Image (cartoon, rainbow, N blue to C red):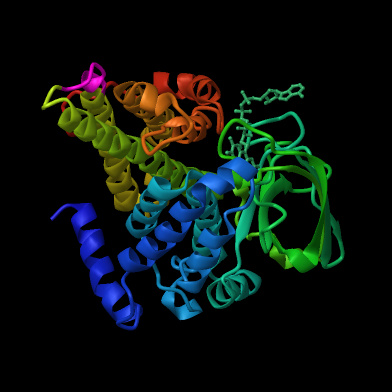
Amino acid sequence: MNVQEAGLRITDERSEVLLNRGPSFQERTAAVATAAAADADEVDAKARFPKAAIDAARERKLLGAQIPVEFGGFGASIFDITEMCYTLGRACSSAAMIFAMHQTKVACLVRHGTGSKYHEALMRRVAAEQLLLASSTTEGNNGGNIRSSAAAVETNGTEISLVRNATVISYGAEADGIVTIARRSSDAASSDQVLLAITRENYTLERSLAWETLGMRGTCSAGFELKAKAPADQVFPEAYEKIHAQTMTPVAHLCWSSVWAGIAAASVDRAQRFLRKAARGAGGQMPPGAAHFTAAKMSLAKLRAIITANLDNYAAREHDERALSSLDFQSSINLLKVEASELAVQTVMSAMRACGLSGYRNDGEFTVGRLLRDVLSSPLMINNERILSNIATSSLMSGVPTSLRD
Ligand SMILES: Cc1cc2nc3c(=O)[nH]c(=O)nc-3n(C[C@H](O)[C@H](O)[C@H](O)COP(=O)(O)OP(=O)(O)OC[C@H]3O[C@@H](n4cnc5c(N)ncnc54)[C@H](O)[C@@H]3O)c2cc1C
């Protein structure tokens, strides 16, 4: 039995016991996906928060799915969560990306908050109140350079405060809490960072930038001045450097890639329906773009394969800090983001070309426009070139494999 099968089997057993013989994760996610799909076009057209989808996820307790059972959640695994991201990605890109970002923050809370009184209480709240957590890493013009912060935590006795020029916070206005990075103190180096969890009562947001974009319009990723005041124990006990390597990067890249694969799958689905209809209407004659459909299916297969390989890889090392920090693992999980985003764009482009004008149109049942606009965000969501240049030096230090599997 491989790691994934083992993971899924444990999850199946847990689902039965933990979900109280209620609906399975699959059934809950399907209900959320139905709500998300029904709202997706309007969410995109009006660049508005996908409230129906997030409300449906709350109702079905999926926002707290990863929280351990002892804190009131379902103890969902990374396999469960990425499957949810994929299913939601097929329905509404923005709702799926919001879900993925929230789950990444929850993963940090679960792994690095256990043992800390405040963070355990927050886990209980996420499960009981289905709190939605947003992420603040982007700051000023520093873009996706996450391992460097400008704003610093100021400590005054048992209180801390933080003022941050947060140029992008997806669903910042709708979230119940924010998980943010910051410099440890005003005299710390920019890379000496901490992670901090704050909820509504701890902060104010003043809008500084709008979110008028080509795609992913429903993520409502506006810019804000974030001002926070909170008890000092809301800072995670471990340094951000560790959290970044063990959880933030792997879980973000696995969840984002699963969302993009879902978007790609939705485009392949449209292309398939288009070709079937066109061929039926032409006495079995395939339309000229048919070869692009095969290309779309091929790149979707590659995309799913690299995600599942990386999922197995992560699950096998999940409890081994050294293995998670190794050069090989870090390169592989960073390259996953680069490869998955490029393959997702390629797949949607091929699906569009398979559909021809019917895919290019913004109306009609075979339009691929929204999916293409949404998926084009993937290479930019931490620029792929930034990631490639960051790992260029470390790649020189790791050996070239001498066998296919090891
Ligand atoms: C759909 C989506 C959702 C996102 N959600 C979040 C979120 O919830 N929280 C979050 O923190 N971030 C979020 N981001 C932002 C993301 O994390 C990266 O910060 C962003 O994609 C930029 O990445 P980059 O810096 O690698 O790439 P690039 O866009 O290529 O780099 C931008 C670089 O250009 C420079 N630059 C940019 N603007 C200026 C300017 N006006 N003047 C001078 N120089 C400038 C900066 O050096 C910056 O590093 C989101 C991005 C997307 C696409």
Q: Residue furthest top?
A: 288
Q: Residue furthest bottom?
A: 20
Residue 115 position within the rendered picture, expressed as x and y whole percent measured from the top left: 55, 71
**In this image, 192 relative to 388: left or right?**
right
Comparing 220 with 4, the one in front is: 220
Residue 119 position within the rendered picture, expressed as x and y whole percent measured from the top left: 61, 69
Res 356 quadrant in image: top left
Quadrant containing the C terminus in the rendered view: top left
Compared with 186, 128 (above or below) is: below
Compared with 87, 289 (above or below) is: above
**In this image, 63 relative to 141: left or right?**
left
Q: What residue appears at the point 72 percent right and 42 percent down from the top-left corner?
A: 222
Q: What residue appears at the point 47 percent right and 69 percent down from the top-left corner?
A: 67
Comparing 185 with 205, the one in front is: 205
Q: What residue appears at the point 41 percent right and 36 percent down from the top-left corner?
A: 364
* Residue 248 visible in image: no
- Whether residue 291 appears in magenta in the rendering, the answer is yes
**In this image, 114 relative to 19: left or right?**
right
Q: Which residues are magenta?
A: 286-292
Q: Exactly how many numbered labels are in the figure?
A: 0
- Whether residue 191 appears in magenta in the rendering, the answer is no
Quadrant containing the N terminus in the rendered view: bottom left
Q: What residue appears at the point 68 percent right and 51 percent down from the top-left corner?
A: 180
* Residue 93 visible in image: yes
| Displayed-image quarter of ligand 1 | top right
Res 201 quadrant in image: bottom right
**In this image, 274 relative to 256: left or right?**
left
Comparing 279 with 281, the one in front is: 281
Residue 13 position within the rendered picture, expressed as x and y whole percent measured from the top left: 24, 73
